[in-house]
Image: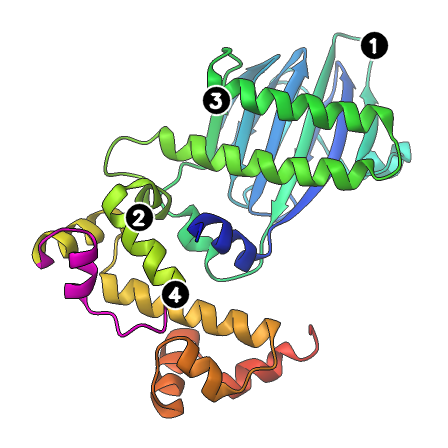
Amino acid sequence: MDVLADSLRSLRLKTEVYGRLELSAPWGIKLDLGLPGFFHAVSRGGCWLEVEGQRIALAAGDWVFILGSAPHFLRDSPRTRTRPLPELYEETGAQCGGVLRHGGDGPQTTLISFSFGFAGAWLDRLLAGLPHVLHVRGDGSGATRQVESVIQLVAAEMEAGRPGHELVATRLADVLFIHALRMHVEAFPEGKGGWLRALEDPQLGRVLQQLHERPQHPWTVEAMAKLASMSRSTFAARFQQVLGESPLTYLTQWRMHTATRLMAESDASMTAIAEAVGYETDSAFGKAFKRHVGSTPAAYRRQLQPSR
């Protein structure tokens, strides 16, 4: 099992392609949409990004990956006033996924922009420990060339505007999201980076894969340590250091996340769901579920009915 891919599926990653933004100075854009992730690539020109008090100069070939729902600003100059992006789309009549032209008569900048939305409690764990901004310069390294190739494909799809171009661009944006997450992890020193770093760890990653693949197994810390080829005490300390919680706490959280996913995606009985996540009785499952989710399994499922 690919733990990252499985977790992203459970979070129901949704990519919104804003499009290719053709901007001429003076121009300024504000994004305050309450979404947990944004990606901007500069294919021509340059601009300034401001987010959470940071001011970053972006040049052609650079891209930036922003995590968190705080508003951020893009503009040709730190002094230029900004306007909300949805307002510009409405004013120009442009469509998301296409080309937006805005600004004055000055130097031109082209941006390729996306947002990323999620649904699911596992999001906090996915983003835990990661910096809110990853700025990657177009330096021609192997990792950046891969991203640049995908960006070029997205730009070409938007420019051609052929039937299905928005769907193609959205799927390519999903690829960019994975690349950006990988580079986020690689930017961390050893022992940092939380859950994503743990996936890359040969010993901890092996344990996480098995926990995700077999949540119904009667796991103990001893069994996990044996799987990691570590002593019980060393494994428990290493797990706590990297993930910020004990192995059994993590297991329970994953079981509850899996249970909520099964309730949302299937009509399986509560007994079947309890067994699928490692509980022998409905009573034990119900107590654990209420303690971690805040409601009984039955009440949680009733809340899901309108959305299903």
Image check: 100 left or right of 118? right
Front residue of 30 and 98 = 98
10 Å neighbourhood of mark 3: few (<14), some, or many (≥20)? some
Under tag 1, what secondary structure?
A: loop
Task: Please state which amino acid type lies under the numbered disc 4.
Answer: Trp
Q: In front: mark 2 or mark 1?
A: 2
Under tag 2, what secondary structure?
A: helix
Which of marks 4 and 3 precedes in the sequence?
3
Under tag 4, what secondary structure?
A: helix
- Residue bearing the label numbered 4: 254
Front residue of 91 and 138 = 138
Locate residue 261, reporting x and y percent: 53, 69
Measured Cα–Cα span from mark 2 to mark 1: 53 Å
Under tag 3, what secondary structure?
A: helix
Image check: 307 left or right of 22? left
The span shown in magenta is 215-232
Disc ID at residue 105: 1
Which of marks 4 and 1 precedes in the sequence?
1
Picture residue at 15% right of the left edge, 53% below the top: 235
Measured Cα–Cα span from mark 4 to mark 2: 15 Å
Number of numbered discs overlaid on the protein picture: 4
- Residue bearing the label numbered 2: 205
Residue 230 is covered by the magenta coloring: yes
Front residue of 105 and 160 = 160
| Res. 24 image quadrant | top right
Say whether residue 60 is visible: yes
10 Å neighbourhood of mark 2: few (<14), some, or many (≥20)? some
Measured Cα–Cα span from mark 3 to mark 4: 31 Å
Which of marks 1 and 3 precedes in the sequence?
1
Task: Please state which amino acid type lies under the numbered disc 2.
Answer: Gly
Picture residue at 40% right of the left edge, 86% below the top: 286
Residue 219 is covered by the magenta coloring: yes
